[in-house]
Amino acid sequence: MCAGADSDGTHASPERPETVQQEGWPAPLNRAWELVFPSMAQLVRRVSGLPRGIDNPRRVTERFPDTREGRQAADGWAKGLDDPRTFYDVRTRIDGRVVNKSFTTRKAADAWATQISHDKLTGVAIDPRSGDELFSHYAQRWLDTRRVKGRPLAPKTLELYRVLLRAHIEPTFSNRQLSAITPEAVRRWHAKVSIDSSAMSAAKSYRLLRAILATAVADGLIQANPCRVRGAGTERSVERPIVGPELVLELADAIGARWNVLVLLAGFGGLRLGELLALRRRHIDLAAGTVTVEEQVVSLDGGRRILTEPKTEAGRRVVALPQLVLDSLAEHLDGIGEDANSLLFPTEGGGLLPTTTFYKHWRRARHQVGHDELHLHDLRHGRHPCRLDRRHRARADGPPRPCQPRRQPPLPARRQGPGPGHRRRSRRHPPRPPETRRAINAR
């Protein structure tokens, strides 16, 4: 029988551990009682009913300890009441706060008391009242305090999260308490969102919900994350085409003189559109043949444009450019201001260029070369690894020479096993020198 239980296996009163401090018991065992008892939950039987023999009686309540004598007293007191009702209250302390929970059956009370005692011993007990906060309130605080590698959320990311919360998550979970969000509720919500929206939106929304509730677990508000749908946060994007250098040159010729450098930088430098629109004269080093990326233009809802740092540390980089792009850049720099902070692709007033202005010319150019399905981002993924020069341009004297990738050394031939009659030597024991063999044979 476990310590702290009566002969019938019920929980003992709080005074029970003090009675086991007997002479002759080892000191470590007495110390174990002192460590274990604070984590134990106290079970109390609460009996209520209407007194007999009184006009207009009011319901009275009496509490009894969970001992053999207490249960006998509770049964005797209930016999003198009309409409008796019995409840089982479990009282414990979590993080210095008293927690009470009532049950209608003894079995449920015992189960919860055992579970909460185990959680306290293992250090994972959570006050049930901690999860009473509404999801909408906690999600707003999460957005305000979220940090990724010590940095706040990027403006575009913050805007995306607000849209996902408003459109897909809060219609279901806005008015629910954090502790009331169950794995079944998440599974039902994800099934509905997958039908009502695209697969990419459903995956993004699920990842956002999972991240918010994971923070709630770390804050000690809920015990476990209810987001347990396998594979729900995985996006399966359509594979994009690989753009070769010849197609990049065709697009640069088709788009016109003002934008051809932008297309060449995207195709042979791997820059994003936001990074291209933020380039200034000081970012170009023609002598070193490089372009420095340290800013980007972010377009927000309502047509507002802001200048920010790259989203990650890897976004700040120096990119080497082929000679072809450097020559085009030199010609382009002659047409902009001499100030080091002059934008390479400004508006007529010198401000940040809207993406819609460029996309109007981009759609016309890709239609002209017969590739209406191309995105500007496809040029970045198809960035060619070798350097180009003007010989690869299509000229009147003939077609362009293809840019050959760098040759890789051939792989060594696979070593075959020993042939017949081969005597394998042990690698652990190398052959002995002739002098040693002669000395051994002379014995």
Image: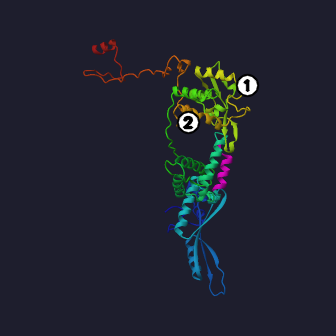
Relative to 299, residue 126 above or below: below
Given the image, on which type of amino acid does mark 1 rest?
Gly
Q: Position of residue 117 (x, y in %)?
A: 57, 59
Which label number is shown at residue 337? Answer: 1
Q: What colour scheme governs how the chains and residues are painted in the rendered image of this protein?
A: rainbow
SS assignment at label 2 = loop
Which label number is shown at residue 286? Answer: none
Q: Nearer the viewer, residue 91 or 1?
A: 91
Given the image, on which type of amino acid does mark 2 rest?
His
| Magenta-colored span | 135-147
Q: Position of residue 401 (x, y in %)?
A: 49, 20
Q: Position of residue 329 (x, y in %)?
A: 64, 23
Distance from the alpha carbon under mark 1 to that under mark 2: 30 Å
SS assignment at label 1 = loop
Q: Position of residue 71 (x, y in %)?
A: 56, 74
Q: Is residue 166 magenta?
A: no
Query: Going by the picture, which residue comes out furthest to the left?
Result: 421
Relative to 273, residue 23 above or below: below
Of mark 1 and mark 2, the one earlier in the sequence is 1
Relative to 242, residue 288 above or below: above
Residue behind mark 2: 375
